[in-house]
Image (cartoon, rainbow, N blue to C red):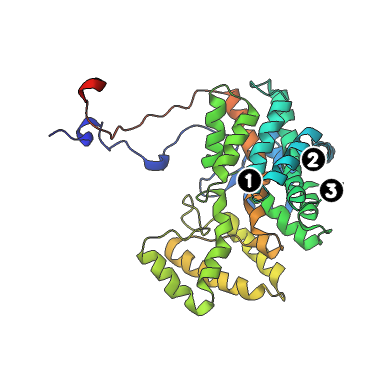
Amino acid sequence: MTTAADNTRGDAGLARGLAGVVAGRTAICSLDGDLRYRGYGIEPLARAADFEDVAHLLLHGELPTAAQHRAFAERIRSAAAALDRTVIEALALLAAREPAATPMDALRTGVSMLGLLARDDTPGPPEALVAAAERLLGQVPALLTAWLDLVAGRPVAPWPGASLAPALLQRLTGRVPSPAAVTAFGATLVLYAEHEFNASTFAARTVVSTGSDMHSGVVAAIGALKGPLHGGANEKVLEVLGAIGSTDRVAAWLEEQFAARRVVMGFGHRVYKDGDVRAKLLADLCRDLVRGTPDEGLEGLAGRVEQIMLDRKGLRPNRVYHALGLPVKVFTPIFAVARMSGWTAHIIEQIGDNRLIRPLSLYSGPPPRTYQPLASR
């Protein structure tokens, strides 16, 4: 009898999840031995640059001068402060109807509404694409904080007159952040700004490769980032630590997961074999933030999990947002705020040198069959 497998082209060329497949060229980011943004190593960027520095680098191709930095930061701040009232009113109705909806749902819907209001239905010229990208860098964090206000029953607070990291952290916490908190939070935005052809970026590039618009590509990227195997994984770290409970249970609990071949969510990235370089840079910041606080014990538990995961799997997590006192529900949306710079840079690059992204598949269904009319079935 002929089987479905006999009718496929064979599995020799199959790369599940496109693992290891080179799907295109990019001048934006490289992961060849080290994470680099347009040639700059991530460590000096994370330690010395702010988000505006890095976003300008990704979108414009070069680090800004002092004057360019000021102008760029002001354009982002102005976009955040001028979020369209129609979008806020629509979000208010949605918040009243579905207050349990996730912030990622609100971001996805909000960006779609912004695209409608901008009449963004086809790719524009390069300068228009860059201008749209800069607006989104401010609009998306404003969407996030507006949604949080609305579901809490508060009026939407004005956007602070500061650069993105301190302004967003102030809006998320309701207080002016300390310099140490701004430094740590800003470093996360820099580290999460871009990561080559990850799932959400590839989704955005695929959408705009059809001739679609920037907002549609960003909506697709947000949908991809929402998934627990991508951006949503960072929300699972605290669930893992809660399930373990105490330091003396770490080894046994992890061995159970390894034996059952379960993924320990929130710990690691398949691209990195020696641990995620971003998490390595954030580990010291996190320890400094929690030293002398009630979270120091949780950090010790997480450190023990991290060490075993690094020894066995080469994986590390990120816990900075918890140390900053932020609720779990905003972890992935903050990731989206940071990644907006990378997504839009990739969208512009794809549109500038486009070819429709259309891979092949291996058929695994039934062999050829003869259609039978309804009366004879």
Residue 157 tag number: 3
The residue identified by callout 2 is 80
Seen in the image, is 233 located left or right of residue 94? Answer: left
- Please tell me whether residue 198 is drawn above or below residue 152 in the rendered image: above
For the residue marked with disc 2, what is the amino acid? Ala
- Please tell me whether residue 306 is drawn above or below residue 134 in the rendered image: below
Q: Position of residue 270 (x, y in %)?
A: 46, 51
Q: CA distance from mark 3 to mark 1?
A: 20 Å
For the residue marked with disc 1, what is the amino acid? Met
Which residue is farthest front? 375
Q: CA distance from mark 2 to mark 3?
A: 11 Å
Q: SS for tag 1?
A: helix
Q: Earlier in the sequence, mark 3 or mark 1?
A: 1
Q: CA distance from mark 2 to mark 1?
A: 18 Å
Q: SS for tag 3?
A: loop
- Residue at (31%, 35%) from the top-left corner? 13
Residue 104 tag number: 1
- Residue at (28%, 35%) from the top-left corner? 364
Which residue is farthest bottom? 248
Q: How many marks are shown on the rendered structure?
A: 3
